Image (cartoon, coloured by chain):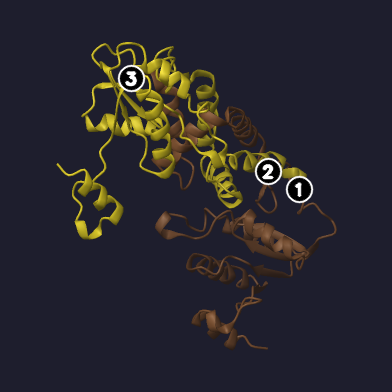
Chain colours: A yellow, B brown
Amino acid sequence: MSDTHSLDTLIQALRRLPGVGQRSAQRMAFHLLQHDREGAQQLARALHEAVGQVRHCARCHTFTEAEVCATCSDPRRDASQLAVVETPADQAALERTGAFRGRYFVLMGRLSPLDGIGPRDIGVQRLIERACDGVVREVILATNFTAEGEATAHLIGQALRSRGLAVTRLARGVPAGSELEYVDLGTIAHALVDRR
Amino acid sequence: MSDTHSLDTLIQALRRLPGVGQRSAQRMAFHLLQHDREGAQQLARALHEAVGQVRHCARCHTFTEAEVCATCSDPRRDASQLAVVETPADQAALERTGAFRGRYFVLMGRLSPLDGIGPRDIGVQRLIERACDGVVREVILATNFTAEGEATAHLIGQALRSRGLAVTRLARGVPAGSELEYVDLGTIAHALVDRR
């Protein structure tokens, strides 16, 4: 229907969001136009603003509006430790623990041959240069414990160890507060091997 | 972090979409900024455009960019039949059947006391005026067969019948292509009562 061109265009644009199919996109468009036009305007402005302002930190590659992000330019952080994470969300999870005071390198992804994501796309070369700055002593691989995250950690670990850097990996084991009965076998097996 | 203000703002704006929580919003924002900035720009433009262009049809209340929508202004449609649906998506579903050639009234919602949505919010008074134009002979209630849709149909049906209009409801019964063994009891009971 030509009298709903801008509605159809909106539904198609919403479908480009990850995890949003035709029905969700329709529901979102109807909701915004029927109940929250102010929210739609806000979202339009926020998108425009973010695309214009957000770039990658020159040192750790996370999202920032500055040349170098707040974490990388904080002099109180321990420059000898570098944690490698997949996404800003993973970095935020580590930060919430308060247990790590070093710096980060954010891959902004993970190796995923099936999706055509190789070492170049996650900036492995840039990470190597960053880690070999002469100040970093230990690289802590904090990629996810999924098949793709493990493969990413493996590749990065090899590359960094061959350059003489100390490389560690987050410990695998039984999650805090969990009962053994309900923990999967692989996790228990790892916890046994890494017992201390 | 103040160096990610526009990113945080974007995540908050995305959370206003129905069904989108903090994690989804984060994932959407990261995806757009990392992999699809063109898509983000497109979405911003589409939102802006739709909010500016889309309004409600003066006759059936659906979304349109014109004063009166394409369906309402199509002279080939049977003006004596008026189907009442909850949303434009429901109207589209009826249209796809090709079995209805009358006109529509789109409630843009359903009665839902728990959400504070009453007769006024779904334009019952406007529907009554529309249906009493002297041309409409039959009003077909095509709201959903949910508790809320049934309550909506009941209220509207009473209001219209009391004004002397013929009111019908879509038939309930066994869906085409289904095996009785797998159809729920309520549906089979209705199909029995409405047998022909």
Q: Is residue B5 above or below residue B147?
A: above
Picture coordinates of residue A13, whole percent (x, y) = 62, 38
Q: Is residue A175 visible?
A: no
Amino acid of disc 3: Gly
Within 10 Å of the Cα at label 3, are there few (<14), some (14-19), or many (20+) other Cα atoms?
Answer: few
Q: Residue at x 81, y 60 (%)?
A: B77
> Do the residues at discs 2 and 1 belong to one chain?
yes
Residue B86, by quadrant, is: bottom right
Rounded to the nearest angstrom, the CA distance separating label 1 from label 3 is 65 Å
Q: Which residue is mark 1?
A: A1
Q: Is residue A11 above or below residue B3?
A: below
Q: Residue at x 42, y 21 (%)?
A: A127
Q: Residue at x 66, y 40 (%)?
A: B54
Task: Identify the chain of the residue marked 2, using the numbered disc in the image.
Answer: A
Q: Which residue is mark 2?
A: A8
Say which label, 1 or 3, has the lower sequence index. 1
Q: Residue at x 52, y 44 (%)?
A: A35
Q: Which residue is mark 3?
A: A164
> Do the residues at discs 1 and 3 belong to one chain?
yes
Rounded to the nearest angstrom, the CA distance separating label 2 from label 3 is 56 Å
Residue B180, by quadrant, is: bottom right
* Element class at badge 3: loop
Along the viewing direction, whichever of A183 and B14 lies nearer the viewer: A183
Say which label, 2 or 1, has the lower sequence index. 1
Say how many tags the image has: 3
Q: Are marks 2 and 3 in contact (CB under 8 Å)?
A: no
Quarter of the N terminus of chain B within the rendering: top left
Quarter of the C terminus of chain B within the rendering: bottom right
Task: Identify the chain of the residue marked 3, using the numbered disc in the image.
Answer: A
Viewer-nearest of discs 1 and 3 = 3
